[in-house]
Image (cartoon, rainbow, N blue to C red):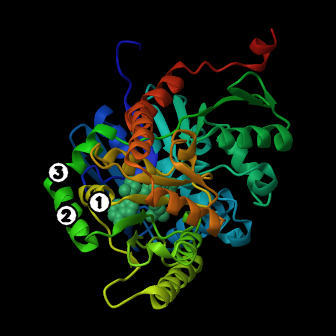
Amino acid sequence: MADRQRRLVVVSNRVGPLNDEGKAGGLAVGLSDALKRRGGLWFGWSGDISEEGTFSAEHTEVQDDVAMTTIDMNQEDIDGFYYGYANRSLWPLLHYRLDLAHFDRQSDRVYRSVNQRFAARLAPLLAEDDLVWVHDYHFFYLGSELRQCGFKGRLGFFLHIPFCPPEIFTALPASHDIVRAMLAYDVVGFQTETDRRNFVAFCIRELGGEKLDGRRVRVGDRTVMAQTFPIGIDAHGYSRFATSPEAGEHEEMLRDLAGDRLQIVGVDRMDYSKGLVERFRGFERLLEDYPENRGKVQFLQVAPLSRSELGAYVDLRRELEELAGHINGRFATLDWTPIQIMTRGFTRRALAGIYRAARVCLVTPLRDGMNLVAKEFVAAQDASDPGVLVLSRFAGARAELSDALIVNPYSTDDIARALQRALTMSFDERSHRWERMREAVFAGTAAHWCDEFLASLESFDPVTPETDAA
Ligand code: ADP
Ligand code: G6P
């Protein structure tokens, strides 16, 4: 097997695109960067809702060496599985937002059933020596369902978002079922050590498991590898995007608009985990406490709408628009609008140009698995005028990007102070910090992440309790 590369089969709710379309979401970006290199099958939801019968249509599109096979779901499945369980129960809970989490039996049922039906559709497409790699919180049960269907090959799982401490996760009525189901995978990957430790703590405290060594955990007769694999971007590709004509046009447009004002940017899906309200207040505090910035800086927040059928997201949009209106009302002059919010999508090249025009990028999530925007911003900068990254201590990216200005995203004062420091930072300090962050972004790429995970999955050696005790 060592000489022949096994086929990679990736499963995730969102599939593609492999090109430079303007779709927001770190999972799709990280996976397409990784899959383009290795090839394989990418299986998941088409993004379409069909009423013709659940899981009726199957579509396959082949691009280079990647076959993307997707299926439609009907409205009931989407409501229970995607909006209901994945995004009203699991997403807030895993992001430490127990206050926003809703639990109900019906969506739990649909979530399990969708996982089971995805497994039933995927199983016939699999060969025993495939490496099957399942992604994210939509598919916690998929591995155990594939085992039920008789799949005996290698199964890996990667969680793109945080894994909260057991004290929080146990609030989920099905928390035990979910973590037991995760034990059907051979390798379970997390973005940070904190996430991995939280998972291991759950296995030990809640399920009576034990740690065998630095990486392996055993619960009953199951042994899994729980490891940390921080996801990255295609750093070379991204810096090429940043020097493309499309990026250049966007950079120029923004620089022209800014004139001699310094540009601050934020780029995030409009999601309550991103700390946007606190960030806007931090910007307002900058204008209050450091009045010399009035008329001298402008803040562009790019925030494509996400999951906008859900109440928490509708509320957030309203709150942000009101807050932006309030800040502009308070500080704007005839020739200066302090803050602008845009909800449209951009191509990756256009976004790279926007990053390049910025003196400061604000990445201040209250909690984030990794945050690829932080890495993209670094990759897009140019040595002649590198921008400053202000980064939340609660973003997974903080582990690798400690040369950013690290802030507590809940503290308006902290954000304002960091902004002031970033706006007045000397060229030498900006360059020095950026060089070190750049090294980290180019070392921990999407390709590296993918290779490391798959190497671990290929070398996984299942250990039975007997062998281990011997
Ligand atoms: P999340 O996965 O929670 O959305 P990340 O920061 O990890 O957060 O990933 C977001 C991805 O979405 C990045 O690759 C970013 O470039 C992309 N993105 C964000 N905003 C836009 C937009 N307006 N248009 C297109 N892509 C976007
Ligand atoms: C995060 C999640 C992904 C998700 C993406 C966009 O990156 O980890 O699984 O695809 O957000 O969210 P959406 O609900 O539009 O798929």
Secondary-structure class at tag 1: helix
- Residue 375 rendering spot, x and y as whole percentages: 42, 47
- Residue 404 rendering spot, x and y as whole percentages: 51, 47
**Residue on which the image places disc 2:** 252
Secondary-structure class at tag 2: helix
Marks 2 and 1, the one that precedes in the sequence: 2
Q: Quadrant of residue 350?
A: bottom left
Q: Residues within 10 Å of mark 3 (few under 14, many from 20)?
A: some
Residue kind at label 2, given as amino acid type: Glu
Residue kind at label 1, given as amino acid type: Ala
Answer above or below: position of 26 versus 417: above
Residue kind at label 3, given as amino acid type: Ser
**Residue on which the image places disc 3:** 244
58 or 17, which is in the foreground? 17
- Residue 412 rendering spot, x and y as whole percentages: 62, 69
Answer above or below: position of 334 versus 123: below
* Mark 3 vs mark 1, CA separation in Å: 14 Å
**Residue on which the image places disc 1:** 357
227 or 76, which is in the foreground? 227
Is 410 on the left-hand or right-hand side of 257?
Answer: right
